[in-house]
Each structure stands twice: as C-alpha cells, then as structure tokens.
Amino acid sequence: MPLMLIGLMAGYFFLNGNPAEQSGATTSTVRTMPESEVLLFFLRDVFDKGDAMPTEEEIAKIRYLSVRHDDEDRWRFTYSLDDPFTNGQAELIDYAIHDKLLNTQRIEQKDFEAFSGLTELNLMNEYEVSQGTDVGFRHLQGIKAYAGGFNESFGRIANYFGDNSQIVKLSTQIRSNEELALLLKFPKLQTLEISYVNETVTDFHLLNQLPLQSLSLTTVDHLGWLSSLTGLKSLSVSYSKETDFSALYSLSQLQELKLSMVENLKTIDFMQNMPNLQSLDLDYVPITNLERLRDKTSLTSLRLTSPNKLESVEAVNSLTSLTELSITGYHGAKSPISLPNLKKAELQSKLLLELTAPVLQSLTVDLFSEDLDGADLAKYPRLEQLSLKESGNFTGIPSLNRLTDLRTLHFNETYFFEETSALFQLQHVKAITCTECSFQFDEQESFANNTLEHLTLNQPSFRIGNGDWLNDAENVMHYFADMAALRSFTMQDDSIQTLDFMKDWERIEVLHLENNAISNVEPLAHLPHLRKVYLLGNQAQNKSVLDKGILIY
C-alpha cells in the first residue's frame, strides 16, 4: 500500500508540474539583505558606507534598478532614487564594478527581494543572474514594472506579484499560447516587450484585450494581428520575416515606431496613415528612399542605422521639426541638410560637412578612420557636448575655444598626436572622457588648466614626441600635475605607480585608480576636499595616512 501511494503521488507531480512554480508559492522567507558581494559593494558605495553594511531603510530608497554583465565582463547597474513613474525627469545613474574578482561572481535573483522600495526591476535577460524557484516580489508594494532574466519562464513571472493590477510594464519571453494568455492576468498593462517568441505561439489577438500603449516584438514573423491594436502609441518590431505590412496602416495613433532587421520591408508607405508620428527608428531596413517622409512636420526624431540600400537623404532636409537626427552606416549620395530646430545629432563625418544646424547642442561624429578638423564645428555656436568614435584623427582643437558653451567631450579610439596639449588646455570644457585614445606629448611643461573638473582616461596610449608608444604610463603622468580644477579623475587598469603628480589637486573629490601599481598613498594625505578613493587591485599598505573621513574602496 505505501508503494502504491508513492506511485500515485509521483504521477500527480509529473502531470501537474512544479506546484510552486505554477502557484507562485514559496516556502522561504523574503530576503531583506542581499548576500551577493557584488550588490553589497554597490550599495555601500552608493550610500557612502565605507566598510559598514547598508541598512534596509537605505536599500528601500532605490526606486529603479537594472542590472547586466557587460561586454567587458563588468557588472553594471543603472539606478535611481526617484520613481520614474511619478517623476518623468528622474535621474538614472550608471554604475560599474571594477573589482576583477567581484566581476567573476554571479548574483542570485533572490537578492533583489531586498530592494523593497522598487517600482521597476529590470534584469535585462541577464544570464549571470542565477534564478531560483523560491523567488517572489509580493512584498514589493510599489512594484509596477519587471523585466525578466535569461530565458526566465513567464509562467513563473506571472505569479511573482501581490497585486497584478499594479503592473503596467513587463518584458518577457513567450513560449506558448498558454503563457501568452497569462498576460491577461495584468489588466492594466500598458507597456509590453516580448524579447523572444516561440514559433508555435499564434494567439496574439488576445493582446487587444489589454490597454497597451507600447509594444515591442522580437522574432515575430506574422504581424497581421497588429491591425486590431489601434490604440498603440509606440511600436518596435525586430528580426521579423514578415512580407505584408498592411496592418501598420491601421496604427494611426502611433507616435513612435522602430523597425530593426525587418529584412523584407521595401517601402514605408504606411507613414501616410500616421499623422502623429514623432519618432522613427529604422535599423538595417532595406528601403531605397525616404519620399514618404518628405515634409512630415510631426516628426521630431529620426534615426537611420545602416540603410544600405538608401540612395539619398535629401528628403531629410524637409523635416524642419526635427530636434534629433542620427544617420550612421549610410553609403549613398551626400546632400545638404539644413534643420533650424535640430538640437542633437549623430552623423558620419562626410555628412557633418553638409549639416547646417544653428541651435545644435549635442553632436556625435562617427569618424570611421577619417580626420575631423575642429574648425568645421565652429558653425555650431551653441554646442555643449561633442562625442567622437570609430577611430580617427582630431585636429584643429584650438578652434573649440570659440564654442563658449562647450562643456563635455567624449572620445573613443581618437588620435590627437601634435594637439594633445591643446586638448588638455581648452578654455571652456569641464569634462573629458577618453577611451582607447592615443596621445602624443611634446617636450614641455605640464598642462595648465583651471577649468577642467572631470577627467577619465580608459586604456590610453602615450608617446613622447615621435618616440615609441610607452608601456608605462608612469612616464607621462607628470604632464597632468597642474590641473588645478579637477574634482574627479579616473584611470583604471593601467600602470600608475606614484601619485606625486596629484599632490596639488586641491579641489579633487573622487579618485578612481583601481587595478594600477600604487604602493604609497601619502601624496593624497593633504588634499582638503578628497572624499572617495578607489584602490582595489593596488598594493598600497599605508592607507591609514588618509583622513578617517575619506572612504576607501
């Protein structure tokens, strides 16, 4: 008899699956403090705790949190102490872990139960977040949005929350019609991202029972059912093999549209039925012309990425309401573009010379191994931020002093050669970030700069004169000794040995020096405003010489 009972019970569980997963029930208690060393380090830093543990009350102050393990194998968090659902201007702050050992560790999904004040948790389909069957967020009274981890079952997600009617935003994968039907358990869902769909899923018509305003789809090949979602204001479609796009004619309320890797889209005629469209993003879409956009005054943002078959961008010149424009990977004819209201642009260098934009404030240039002369930027008198990427030589740097509003520079794989000195002595710039940049120093005194407040050098290359490229950054750090206005300095994963060049940085507040070769921090002992020093990965033994009020990580 006992054996028979055991057999019956085994059959029950086999047929009904995991009851805990289906019901969302959990036998474990809610985790009130993260156990992951990665999360604890992040929290101690954010709340200036030093070696002390964060409190539950402090953790509850975080309202938004996203987490990912980036391409450089670093943990990255984006967080906010403001609720983005009640404050449309909530500041989202990016944070990266630089401890090499911490970056090898995984984070348990259950650790996020400790963030009791969250209104949005985004696990970004992250593989390095370990999932478990005993996770739940029923205690998060303010939770409104959730994005799942790697291949996380929506059957499980659907049972995470105490009140599904509070959830207005979800990002998940759908592997069956049964999982798709579970979305109806969220009656106030407004924003839905489906990052993967199994080919057996067909019941998309169920989505018209939800008050959706924003929908993002990936790997959905049949889109005819979209015609019933006439209330949509935002739509994104990626990696679709659909050939019939007539359903898009019905979406007359759309304000935002993104089409990415939609390989059979040849025309955008449906734009004529979208009178309210404000933002259009076409990414690797094989259209040949933009005539349907001509004179579309509702459009304020246009992004074209690798439009390989596009022959001309002349129609863009008619979009006088544009405030944001991005055109990259374009191989067609050049054409003059004059946009009186444009404030933000990303362009290839060959198109930059064609652009007239008198109120432009933010500019990103894709150099693609070409040169850029700073004199060509003088026609943008209101420019505040400049970014250069994709490898190239930047000359004419003194011309930037004519741009009196220019405050922030970002460079990626940029070569400066003879004008390194001019870069570090610009008159108006307050922040410079250089990643994999190459600098040539002349035989001269250190740079004198009383304006620059924030300097970041990521994996820089240095040489003096026309000599060989140096393996040891120690030989050039003295050039930075007279940067008297610096408030933060970052140079990680390099070969700094001594800190004497910093001894006169009287305004410095934060130093990121992780993973260098520093053994002596005494030169920092008399810096009056220093409050944080990141020394992970160094061999410094005399940290005690620093004031006890300085946080050392």
Image (cartoon, rainbow, N blue to C red):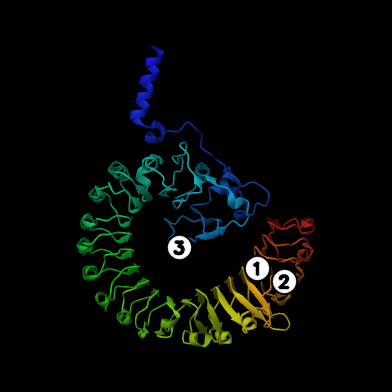
Quadrant of the frame with the N terminus? top left
Q: How many marks?
A: 3
Q: Position of residue 308 (x, y in %)?
A: 34, 73
Q: Is residue 276 visible?
A: yes
Label pair 2/1, CB-CB below 8 angstroms: yes
Mark 2 neighbour class, 10 Å CA radius: few under 14, some 14 to 19, many 20 or more: many
Where is mark 3, residue-wise? 89
Upstream in sequence: badge 3 or badge 2: 3
Of circles 2 and 1, the one toward us is: 1
Q: Position of residue 471 (x, y in %)?
A: 69, 70
Label pair 1/3, CB-CB below 8 angstroms: no
Q: Is residue 123 above or below residue 433?
A: above
C-alpha separation, residue under disc 3 versus residue under disc 2: 34 Å
Of circles 1 and 3, the one toward us is: 1
Q: Amino acid at mark 3?
A: Gln
Where is mark 2, residue-wise? 505
Mark 3 neighbour class, 10 Å CA radius: few under 14, some 14 to 19, many 20 or more: few
Q: Is residue 431 above or below residue 157?
A: below
Left or right: 367 with respect to 252? right
